[in-house]
Structure formats: C-alpha cells, structure tokens
C-alpha cells in the first residue's frame, strides 16, 4: 500500500465514537467520581459494535503503540486489589494489548510502548515522555474530520520520527480503559472492559480510525483480553 492511499483506507473503516463525558482523572477517587457522573450503559443507547483494526491498510508498515495513561473502574467492582498500584496496572494493560496485537496481527510491524520509551530516552529534550502525553483526551471523539490537538499532534509526530528504522506514519493510541459492572455481587463480579482505540496519521494529524473494544470477564485482564481480541475478529 502506498502511503498516499493510507488515509483513505483508514477513513473507510472509521467508526466515530460519541461519548457525552470525558473520563479523566487520577487513580481511584477522582476516577470513580468521573465514572459516577457518566450514564450507566443500561441507561444509554446500544453501543456501536467494535470495528476491526484496519491492518490491511498498514500491513508491512511500522505502527507505534502508545502507552495507556488512563485506567478506571467502577467502585462497585471492588477491583482495586486486582488492579493494584496505578503504574503496575498501566504496564499490565500495555503488555496485554501489545502481546495480543503482535500475535494476532503479525502483518503489521508493531512498535510497543517500551520501544517508544527507549527512543524518547535517546533524545532528551526533544522527544516527549510517552507516559506523560495527553492521549486520554482522545477518549472523547471529535467528529468525522477529527484532528489531533496540539501539543499531542507534535509529540506523536516526533516519537514516530525517532522510533524504529525511519519511523512510521501511523500510531495506534489506546486512549483509555474503563471497567464497568455488568452483573454479579462481590467477590466475583463480572465487568465489561471498554478500551477506546484510535489510529492516527501523524503526518496530517488526522484520526483515521476509532472504535471502542468491549469484552466481559470476572477479572480485569480477562475482560481486557477479550476486548482486544474483538479488534482482530475471525481468530480464536
């Protein structure tokens, strides 16, 4: 695929996400307050189905995967002991996402968050810290012609230029991971993992793909695993 066609291919499978509230905040307390202010799935319209990743459009290309910076869970799940310390939970989420994508979509040369971090360390003062970028702002959709805001646009473009052999044009951004109670009382409640994923063209600053991957489980990582698998359907 030639690069000039990539944006067209990605836009063809764009799945715009309409979210009324931006889920942001720190671990536990602030995150719980944000979740409490958002409508429960049972009170909202039926969510759109997960759109598969447009891997055919980026096959044989390098695509960086940015680190997760936002994970929140409803208080009613009582999952704080399962999630653990915030940094450990973010690292576990990165590991689940990266491992599954490399296994299930090997046609793409995925550059995992640790590779982005190493590239950033090699260019202090130039490259942004991948763990401190404002990617969580992309949890909220910006419409059909969605563009990245600055400084995030410039940060992603800089990282793409520094990482790998000559960088790449696209970045996959797991913008946020939310766990919502589905059914069942503690200590083994069931929850739905909602992973907001966007693919961005760092040269133009345009969001070419957006979806929310959903999966259920009675622990965070089973639910996340099932959600990520929805991005690559047709496989076990």
Image (cartoon, helix red, strand yellow):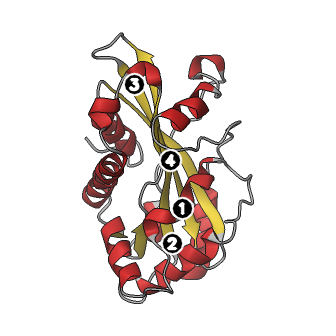
Label 1 neighbour load within 10 Å: few <14, some 14-19, many 20+: many
Label 2 neighbour load within 10 Å: few <14, some 14-19, many 20+: many
Q: Which residue is mark 4?
A: 176
The picture places residue 32, in percent across and down from the top left corner, at 52, 30
Q: Are marks 2 and 1 in contact (CB under 8 Å)?
A: yes
Residue appearing at x 29%, y 45% in the figure: 235
- Tally of numbered tags: 4
Q: Earlier in the sequence, mark 4 or mark 2?
A: 2
Q: Which residue is mark 1?
A: 199
Query: Circle 1 sits in a helix, a strand or a loop, which is it?
Result: strand
The picture places residue 206, in percent across and down from the top left corner, at 66, 68
Q: Which residue is mark 2?
A: 170
Q: Are marks 4 and 3 in contact (CB under 8 Å)?
A: no
| Residue 194 seen in render | no
Q: Earlier in the sequence, mark 1 or mark 3?
A: 3
> In whole angstroms, how far apart are the C-alphas of marks 4 and 1?
13 Å
> In whole angstroms, how far apart are the C-alphas of marks 4 and 2?
18 Å
Residue appearing at x 41%, y 76% in the figure: 61
Q: Is 162 above or below relative to 109?
A: below
> In whole angstroms, how far apart are the C-alphas of marks 3 and 2?
31 Å
Q: Which residue is mark 3?
A: 191
Q: Are marks 4 and 1 in contact (CB under 8 Å)?
A: no
């Amino acid at each position: 695929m030639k690069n000039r066609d990539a944006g067209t291919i990605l836009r063809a499978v764009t799945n715009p996400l309409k979210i009324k509230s931006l889920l942001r905040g720190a671990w536990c307390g602030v995150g719980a307050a944000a979740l409490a202010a958002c409508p429960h799935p049972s009170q909202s319209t039926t969510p759109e189905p997960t759109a598969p990743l447009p891997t055919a459009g980026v096959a044989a290309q390098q695509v960086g995967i940015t680190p997760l910076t936002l994970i929140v869970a409803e208080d009613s799940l009582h999952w704080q002991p399962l999630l653990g310390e915030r940094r450990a939970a973010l690292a576990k989420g990165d590991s689940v996402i990266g491992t599954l994508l490399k296994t299930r979509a090997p046609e793409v040369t995925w550059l995992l968050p640790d590779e982005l971090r190493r590239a950033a360390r090699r260019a202090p003062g130039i490259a942004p810290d991948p763990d401190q970028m404002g990617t969580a702002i992309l949890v909220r959709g910006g419409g059909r012609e969605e563009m990245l805001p600055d400084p995030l646009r410039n940060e992603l473009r800089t990282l793409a230029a520094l990482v790998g052999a000559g960088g790449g044009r696209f970045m996959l951004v797991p913008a946020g991971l939310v766990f919502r109670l589905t059914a069942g009382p503690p200590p083994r409640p069931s929850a739905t993992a909602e992973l907001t994923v966007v693919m961005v063209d760092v040269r133009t600053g345009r969001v070419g793909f957006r979806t929310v991957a959903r999966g259920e489980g009675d622990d965070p990582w089973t639910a996340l695993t099932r959600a990520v698998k929805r991005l690559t359907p047709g496989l076990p």
